Image (cartoon, rainbow, N blue to C red):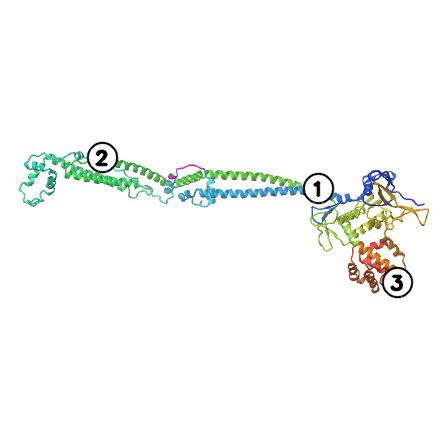
Amino acid sequence: MNYKMQSAVEKIILNDAVFMNEVIEPTSVNFFYGKNGTGKSTVAKALKTNRNIQWQNGKYAADYDVLAYDTDFIDANFSNYDNLAGVFTVCKTNIEIQKKIDELNRQKQIKRENYLASKNLIDKIQQEKSAAVADYQNECWQQTSILRKIFSSVITGKRTKALFSEQILKSVPAEHDISELESVVNTVFGGDDKRYSRYQKARRVTYASFPGYDLMSRSIVSSSETIFSDFIRALNATDWVRHGYTHFTGRTNGKCPYCQQKLSENFEQEISDCFDSQYKEDIAAIVKFQNVYRSEMESVIRTLENNLYDSMPELDTEFYKAKLKMLRDAVTINLQRISSKIKEPATIASLEDTDSILLETGAVIDRFNAEIDRRNNIISDIKNKKNKCKNEIWEYFAFVLKDVVKKYRNRMAKAESDIAELDMQMKAIIIEARRINADISELSRQTVNTESAIDEINRIIRTSGFQGFRLHAKADAANTYEVIRPDGRIAEKLSDGERSFIAFLYFYYLVNGSSKKEELKEKIVIVDDPVSCMDRNAMFIVSSLIRKMTDICCNIRQKSYIRQMFILTHNADFYREITYNQDKYYNSISLYVINKTDNISKITLCVRQNQLIPSEQENYNPVRSAYDSLWDEYRELKSINTISGVIRRILEHYFIKTCGYKENDLYKIVLEDNREKFQDSGYNIASMMISCLNDNSSELNYIDDGTDIEQYRTVFRLIFEVMNHEQHYRMMMNK
């Protein structure tokens, strides 16, 4: 009587979800088949969580290393690296660390974006500062266009917008008299350092004080009593006669100067007797007044005229000249009036006022002399005066532009304040970024070296004949890898099936040699639906690796470090692959089917009475196919005529329908790329086998030329070898 051997997990009691007090007593290797939704994951979860589990010999879950491959394992141990296409990380520890690093990198990226945002704001503010400078310079330049022309001689070296506006900022605003400044500038910077003489005032002349002036307002007549004087007075010709007498006395030669008649010898004496002594004295006094007045006024005018010789150019002498002309004209008139008085003493004469003109002229001279003195004082200390003048002019410029300067300083102060605040923020960001980098470095030191795992995965890929991809370490990132396509390109995106396949290969590595030597725990292996989304090639590799693990677990080939296995799947093809020819190990292997009825699931152990030994039981595979039957038939047939049809159907079912090859692909790989591996007769047999694919006939179109059945079998096996599917052939042949 044979029996089932119990292992580490002695009993599983399921009362969760769709199960009601379902009890399983597992062996070393346990295969579960059930459609999706029947409760496979519930079984796996119970094992992972150690819920309602009975352990053998007083053991506990902690005594074993429980390794479970499922979606949780894939998510925990396989992750894209830094969102890079085709770049990934394996190992739960590394992935957890990488998640922390990714979060830190995310934070660092935010910091970097904030830093760049602040820098961009500073750049904009710097542009605003440049605009403020340009606006300020333009306003300074425009508002002082006239003043700069006036004071052009002073602002040498500051005649550009930039230099001029810069000097304004250095100057203290102060209001000054622009006219005075202009005058000083003309003096100091006019290029003329000559000292000028002061204007001389004319001696004050008051002609009323001159002797004889009073006679001008009196009628001067003679008081002589002669017959001739009475006659002259009667004719009112006194002045006429006196004039002729004065003019012609001693020059007549006894004749009248007017009518040329002979005069008496005493005629001149008679005329002289017509004028008394007082009359003569008065006339003499007026003549003397005339001479004194002329001399004095000519001296005055000469003095005033001399002032105009070498006069300081800055003086406005037009008013002065006008007054001088008025004085000349008045003196001329007065001299004429005095002359008329002398001619006609009896007339009353008045003189033009010149005193007021002289007073006004004197006031002008006082003003002129003040300007001359100021200039001469400046000239005497010209170096200091120039500096003082420059300062005052720049002060005046600054005063005129004080509103412009204020607006500019406010704009610049606001900009500098904003920059200072942003600069502080950027410094804080840098400090934070350095802390983040330190944390990243520390986490990176905690990562697990997965190089050996990837090497093992590549070895499995290479030796299995899988050509979909290989893995390559990424040079610039430790423990990260790239998926390389057969053409050498880096895979930009992995399918779910490829992702699951790589994760399973890493799981296989963990099961088969990743443990530290000091860790002596036996392993409990749980595999929950591993081939979802995988292609046929990947599925067959996974199937092969699981069969290797089951062999180890059953201690068939070597000392077992896998104490117990649980494999669960809904994929019938995969189930057949992993369980093929496993049912013969009744004691150590159990096959289960999970069925669900009315929302209640039942787990059935697939055992039956042994057909050869009725007293014993045997396992049976609940999942078989017509394809399995073809191989069963192939192994038993002895005739070429009958085996040829089976060969055609196997090749067609496996390579065309299952693996997706086209007939042309098979033809090229087998008959063109690998022709040298077939002998002549073998090549012909292989050609006929492939040519008959998709042919509706049941047999190969073959003419027997003495070829035996073993040649057929040899060529049939060789086709699987050159297609890199020898493993499948060996599995189906139970080798």
Pointer 3 residue:
708
Left or right: 207 in relation to 61: left
Q: Residue furthest left?
A: 265
Dots 1, 3 in contact, CB < 8 A? no
Q: Nearer the viewer, residue 12 or 159?
A: 12
How far separated are the C-alphas under marks 1 and 2? 116 Å
Q: Nearer the viewer, residue 90 or 559?
A: 90
Q: Please tell me whether residue 235 belongs to the stretch shown in magenta.
A: no
**Neighbours of disc 3 within 10 Å: few (<14), some (14-19), many (20+):** few
Q: Please tell me whether residue 175 belongs to the stretch shown in magenta.
A: yes
The image position of residue 82, as x and y in percent, is 69, 46
The residue shown at (28%, 36%) is: 360
Dots 1, 2 in contact, CB < 8 A? no
Pointer 2 residue:
206
- Element type at marker 3? loop
The residue shown at (60%, 40%) is: 426
The mark that comes first in sequence, 1 or 2, is 1
Q: Residue furthest bottom?
A: 705
The mark that comes first in sequence, 1 or 3, is 1
Q: The disc labelled 1 sits on which kind of residue?
A: Lys
Pointer 1 residue:
100
Q: Main secondary structure of the magenta part?
A: loop
Q: Which residue range is magenta in the image?
A: 173-179
- Element type at marker 2? loop
The image position of residue 548, as x and y in percent, is 83, 49
Left or right: 529 in relation to 143: right
Q: The disc labelled 3 sits on which kind of residue?
A: Asp
User: Residue 263's image quarter?
Assistant: top left
Q: The disc labelled 2 sits on which kind of residue?
A: Thr
Regarding residue 156, the answer to whether it shows in the image is yes
